[in-house]
Amino acid sequence: MRVAVKLFAIARERAGTTDAWVELAPDATVTDALDELGRCFPKLPSVLTRAMVAVNREYAERTHALHDGDELAVIPPVSGGAAFCHSCANRQTTAPSVPPPSASSELALNEVNGAGSKGVGSYSPFPEGKGERG
């Protein structure tokens, strides 16, 4: 099977490319793909050991099974990072969600935007009734 690979930050720099692909056995996992990337790009293995991965835009564990046509993103730590530790193994594997605004913050936003408490307002950098040219 063939898996597309997106490389970011230092992984992109070390590989000399943003996009790559790997040919893998039908039962391959993320670990198998990373091993193959390390063989193809000899400067990558030290980055791959610390990188987060996403499959089809969802964070994934290294044991995640891959399928033909999947997209694997290699996301290195932004600044150095630490070696993997078993106490971190249960870290959150999906992007955190943004909590909904509280009623008071939504009301304050509406009042700033001119909607009062009747509805959601909109923001415009121009004075009321004026366009870009005033």
Image (cartoon, rainbow, N blue to C red):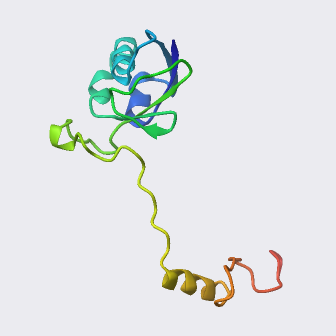
Q: Residue 95's spot in the image, x, y percent?
A: 42, 49
At which x and y percent is residue 31?
Answer: 33, 22
Number of labelled discs?
0
Residue 83 placement: quadrant:
top left
Quarter of the image with the C terminus is: bottom right
Q: Is residue 103 left or right of residue 28?
A: right
Tell me what residue is drawn at x 33 percent, y 26 percent: 63
**Where 24 falls versus 49 (above or below)?**
above
Residue 128 figure quarter: bottom right
Front position in the image: 57 or 131:
57
Closest to the observer, 110 or 9: 110
Residue at point 39% right, 19% down?
33
**What's the residue at 53%, 25% (across, down)?**
70
Relative horizontal placement of residue 112, taking residue 96 as reference (left or right): right
Q: Position of residue 75 (x, y in %)?
A: 40, 37
Residue 59: x percent and y percent? 41, 39
Question: Does residue 44 appear left or right of residue 25 in this picture?
Answer: left
Left or right: where does residue 65 sit relative to residue 92? right
Placement of 123 over or under 55, stated as above or below: below
Q: Residue at x 51, y 82 (%)?
A: 103
Figure check: 64 above or below 80: above
